[in-house]
């Protein structure tokens, strides 16, 4: 068992996800925040507050949770590998080279990168793969909706679900994206044939679900040996 509490470095702490994680951690006795890294100074209580370019000054920590940007992501991955501690990351927009760096780091430490930390989406991913395998000749479309500030389309979550569909039936789906208002996130995986249609739907109404999922993943990853882990497989190992 990992010593309790698990000492955390929260990287990207001034962002919306970082703030949600810090808020939820206040009531979680499994963890203690050892340090935060933020672009703007934060009142971090007893935790050290670090600038992104000063990660090397971080006190000892057992695991890092990262929701930052592609540029500072490399620094926290490098630090975790140097200190031999696990990394949970939800930073979006990382490159193929950065994905390869995650694979390399996984030789030494447990790493988990995911575009979505919703427990419901993790289940939807597994179910979509099974349905695609059962209905390989049906049309499949993924329709996703987000707030107007979201730039990438299709969303990372839509692409995650699309990869599950492709694994299940050997070819990917079509995508449709909507950006409107303050929609947190909605994803529909639709399978259609002549005379019938099957729809799998997930709707997020609070960003706290992603922070909660990342924290649950951190608790599990802290107990794992080095390797590259997927969120759905880590949280629901028997679902596949």
Image (spheres, grey):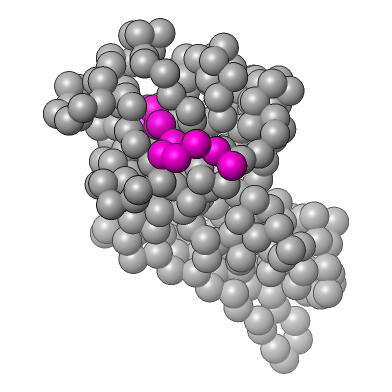
Residue 216 screen position, x and y as percent:
48, 51
164 in relation to 25, above or below: below
In the picture, the quarter occupied by the C terminus is: bottom right
Residue for point 60% across, 78% down: 199
Question: Residue 175 location in percent, x, y?
Answer: 59, 57
**Quadrant containing the N terminus in the rendered view:** top right
> Residue 7 falls in which quadrant of the image?
top left
Q: Identify the residue shown where x is 69% and y is 75%.
A: 191
Residue 160 seen in the current view: no
- Measured from the top left, where is residue 107 in percent x and y? 73, 23
Q: Residue at x 65, y 25 (%)?
A: 109
Look at the image and say whether residue 130 sits in the magenta stretch.
no
Q: Left or right of 65: which side holds 29?
A: left
Please say if 17 is above or below 123: above
Q: Is residue 197 above or below residue 228?
A: below
- Residue at point 75%, 86% (across, down): 194
Q: Residue furthest bottom?
A: 195
Instruction: Name the one closer to the observer, 116 or 13.
Output: 13
Residue nearest the viewer, comparing 77 with 168: 77
Magenta stretch: includes residue 7: yes
Question: Depth check: 156 or 140 in front?
Answer: 156
Q: Position of residue 65 (x, y in %)?
A: 44, 34
* For residue 209, side relative to residue 221 (left or right): left
Over which residues does the magenta segment extend?
Answer: 1-11
Give the tally of numbered discs. Answer: 0
Q: In the rendered view, would you say 138 is above or below 214?
A: below
Whether residue 43 is visible:
yes
């Amino acid at each position: 068992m990992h010593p309790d509490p698990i000492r955390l470095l929260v990287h990207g702490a001034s962002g919306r996800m970082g703030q949600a994680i810090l808020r939820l951690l206040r009531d979680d006795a499994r963890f203690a925040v050892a340090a935060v890294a933020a672009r703007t100074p934060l009142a971090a209580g007893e935790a050290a507050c670090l600038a992104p370019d000063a990660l090397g000054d971080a006190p000892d920590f057992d695991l890092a949770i990262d929701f930052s940007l592609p540029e500072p992501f490399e620094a926290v991955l490098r630090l975790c590998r140097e200190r031999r501690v696990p990394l949970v990351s939800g930073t979006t927009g990382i490159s193929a080279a950065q994905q390869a760096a995650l694979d390399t780091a996984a030789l030494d430490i447990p790493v988990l990168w995911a575009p979505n930390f919703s427990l419901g989406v993790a289940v939807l991913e597994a179910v979509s793969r099974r349905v695609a395998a059962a209905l390989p000749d049906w049309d499949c479309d993924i329709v996703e909706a987000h707030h107007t500030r979201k730039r990438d389309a299709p969303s990372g979550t839509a692409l995650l679900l699309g990869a599950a569909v492709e694994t299940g039936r050997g070819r990917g789906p079509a995508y449709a994206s909507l950006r409107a208002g303050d929609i947190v996130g909605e994803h529909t995986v639709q399978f259609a044939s002549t005379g019938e249609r099957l729809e799998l739907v997930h709707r997020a109404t609070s960003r706290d679900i992603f922070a909660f999922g990342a924290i649950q993943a951190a608790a599990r990853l802290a107990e794992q040996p080095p390797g590259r882990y997927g969120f759905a497989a880590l949280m629901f190992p028997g679902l596949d």
